[in-house]
Image (spheres, coloured by chain):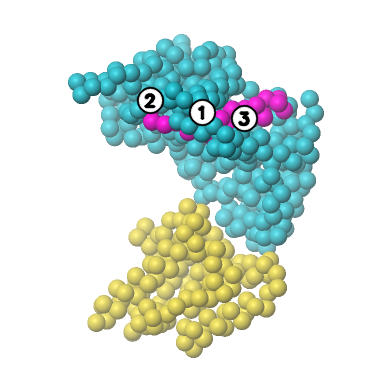
């Protein structure tokens, strides 16, 4: 599936929720399920300190694809991280850099990515792109 | 002295607003309070009827405006029972008041090795200005520790206030916990050693009667916006003898007597500390807010808010796994809590969706959060317009939300 196809899939999943409460329950569920962030990555240099919640991001190359891992101390933030990882992880740097992420807006969570939220998510998305730029340069 | 809560709520137009289609339940009053129509009208009237620069015009409007600004100063003087109106300096708020004091006090009185004493529960704005002096002047910042209940531990006060101490600066009431600090005791201890005391009253003037002469504090600071007044206006009260000893903070118009390139002589109090055109619509708004509070009566306010505090403590206690932070014997209407290990941001986000505005995070008191070893708390803080029904809503919503995080 392409990045856009996954975005479509997520938008469809969220369309099934009539109530904001169901939407957030789902975010909490996938936030709780998000695993794979190793303790050795929990470093100062991977930390994005929002005013409200903390986010850690790690990225590495597997062949020509970037594998992102991330974690947060707040579950709702973690739920949104899980969605971002689902969309962007396992992609080539070019795919990531050429993508337009519209799903967050479409599922009504744009609020969480506004600079005023200070939950670290916006900075995390920037960080994910920066990794893509860096790995692209490395791959040549 | 019963409070007419319907009448009071009707005075605050913003309370009619809805959030995500739900009635607003505003419990973030320690951050800022809403403004009654009386304050909004007073500010509008400045611009509608007599806006003009003050203290410098020969013309009518300038005189009217100057008079309104100076009347507001007198209202503040009476509100905190200062001896003179020129002991009341208008600033932009608590933060500016503390920075002014830190800067001017340091110029004359501070040298390397001197100590400033604060407490462990201070707001950042009563920590950072002093820390800047650590860098600039080699001043040393010490603090009065707290216990688990969030009360200051005064056992070692006589060591903490020693012959190196030059100033004691503590909050009257903690913004994060609601603790009412024993400032009278601290002031007495400091004065026994001839050390001046500044009280940060940002969380106090809206909740309790403040009498600076009775307290005998040397400086007292607060913000208008937490007292139903506009943002951008605040107060530095200082005893005349102290203010006269301090150097000016900012230079500019209004604060001078004569200026030549050979030198400048400074104006008298309070103008010496009020460089530039002051926020005269803000001061008039603050005056109107003080009238508003006086009309209800600060004692009646204190009593009503205490009822709310007790009711909220009792109601919230029924939520499984709730952990309160700040259980001091004497408290103002602030409740800080967590539910189990759930991150405050998670619960705050969900409550927001339900129209309930509370504060989450470290409340600009990170040293305090470090003491409790938590990332932050959920904080509900009550004002004169809050109701028990709103506390019921908070309780029910928090309980419902907490279940989701299981
Ligand atoms: C105890 C205390 N001090 C200082 C401040 C800073 O006030 P302002 O931001 O109005 O300058 C606050 C505001 O939250 C406070 O609660």
Q: Residue at x 56, y 30 (%)?
A: B284
Instruction: Name the one closer to the observer, B292 or B341.
Output: B292
Residue matched to label 1: B61
Q: Which residues are drawn in magenta?
A: B275-297
Picture coordinates of residue B238, whole percent (x, y): 46, 19
Residue B166: x and y in percent read 37, 20
A101 relative to B323, above or below? below
Per the image, the residue denoted by label 3 is B288
Q: Nearer the viewer, mark 3 or mark 2?
A: 2
Pointer 2 indicates a residue of which chain?
B
Q: Quick one: label 2 or label 1, which is nearer the N terminus?
A: 1
User: Residue at the bottom extreme?
Assistant: A1
Chain A, colour shown: yellow
Q: Secondary structure at mark 3?
A: helix
**Is there any visible trace of residue B18 in the rendered image?**
yes
Q: Residue at coordinates 27% horizontally, 25% vertically from top-left?
A: B112
Quarter of the picture containing the N terminus of chain B is: top right
Seen in the image, is B4 located left or right of residue B183?
right
Categorize mark 2 by other alpha carbons within 10 Å: few (<14), some (14-19), many (20+): some
Predominant secondary structure in magenta? helix
Query: Residue reaching furthest front?
Result: B59
| Chain with cyan colouring | B
Which is more foreground, mark 2 or mark 1? 1
Residue assigned mark 2 = B254
First in sequence, mark 3 or 2: give its number.
2
Instruction: Name the residue: 55% across, 83% down.
Output: A8
Counting from the top left corner in percent of width and height, residue B406 is at: 67, 62
Check the image and report above or below for B89 versus A12.
above
Q: Is residue B129 left or right of residue B200?
A: left
Per the image, label 1 sits on a secondary structure element best described as helix
**Residue B286: mark:** none
- Of tags 1 and 3, the one toward the viewer is 1
């Amino acid at each position: 599936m392409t990045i856009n196809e996954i975005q479509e899939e997520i938008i469809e999943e969220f369309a099934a929720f009539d109530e904001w409460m169901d939407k957030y329950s789902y975010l909490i569920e996938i936030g709780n399920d998000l695993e794979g962030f190793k303790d050795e990555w929990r470093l100062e240099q991977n930390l994005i300190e929002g005013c409200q919640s903390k986010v850690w991001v790690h990225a590495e190359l597997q062949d020509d694809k970037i594998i992102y891992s991330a974690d947060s101390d707040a579950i709702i933030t973690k739920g949104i991280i899980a969605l971002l990882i689902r969309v962007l992880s396992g992609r080539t740097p070019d795919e990531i850099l050429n993508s337009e992420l519209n799903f967050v807006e479409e599922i009504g969570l744009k609020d969480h990515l506004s600079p005023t939220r200070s939950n670290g998510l916006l900075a995390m998305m920037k960080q994910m792109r920066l990794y893509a730029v860096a790995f692209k340069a490395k791959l040549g | 002295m019963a409070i007419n809560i319907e009448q009071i709520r009707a005075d605050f137009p913003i309370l009619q607003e809805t959030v995500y289609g739900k009635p607003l339940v505003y419990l973030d009053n320690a951050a800022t309070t809403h403004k009654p129509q009386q304050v909004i009208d007073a500010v509008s009237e400045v611009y509608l009827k007599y806006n003009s620069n003050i203290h410098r015009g020969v013309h009518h409007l300038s005189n009217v405006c100057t008079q309104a600004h100076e009347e507001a100063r007198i209202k503040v003087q009476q509100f905190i029972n200062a001896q003179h109106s020129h002991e009341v300096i208008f600033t932009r708020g608590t933060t500016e008041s503390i920075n002014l004091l830190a800067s001017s006090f340091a110029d004359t009185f501070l040298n390397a090795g001197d100590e400033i004493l604060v407490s462990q529960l201070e707001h950042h704005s009563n920590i950072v200005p002093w820390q800047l002096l650590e860098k600039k002047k080699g001043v040393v910042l010490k603090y009065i520790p707290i216990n688990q209940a969030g009360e200051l531990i005064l056992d070692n006060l006589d060591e903490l206030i020693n012959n190196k101490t030059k100033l004691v600066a503590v909050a009257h009431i903690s913004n994060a916990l609601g603790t009412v600090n024993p400032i009278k005791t601290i002031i007495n201890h400091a004065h026994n050693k001839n050390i001046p005391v500044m009280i940060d009253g940002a969380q106090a003037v809206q909740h309790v009667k403040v009498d600076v002469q009775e307290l005998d504090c040397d400086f007292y600071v607060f913000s208008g916006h937490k007292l139903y007044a506009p943002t951008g206006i605040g107060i530095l009260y200082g005893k005349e003898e102290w203010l006269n000893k301090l150097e000016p903070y900012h230079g500019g118009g209004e604060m001078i007597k004569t200026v030549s390139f050979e030198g400048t002589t400074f104006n008298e109090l309070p103008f010496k500390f009020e460089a530039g055109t002051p926020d005269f619509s803000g001061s008039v708004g603050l005056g109107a807010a003080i009238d508003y509070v006086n009309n209800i009566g600060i004692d009646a306010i204190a009593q009503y808010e205490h009822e709310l505090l007790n009711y909220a403590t009792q109601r919230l206690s029924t939520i499984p796994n709730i952990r309160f932070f700040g259980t001091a014997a004497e408290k103002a209407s602030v409740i800080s809590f967590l539910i189990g290990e759930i991150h405050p941001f998670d619960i705050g986000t969900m409550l927001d969706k339900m129209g309930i505005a509370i504060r989450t995070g470290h409340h600009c008191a990170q040293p305090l959060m470090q003491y409790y070893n938590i990332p932050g708390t959920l904080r509900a803080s009550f004002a004169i317009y809050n109701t028990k029904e709103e506390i019921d809503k908070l309780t029910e919503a928090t309980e419902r939300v907490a279940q989701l995080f299981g």
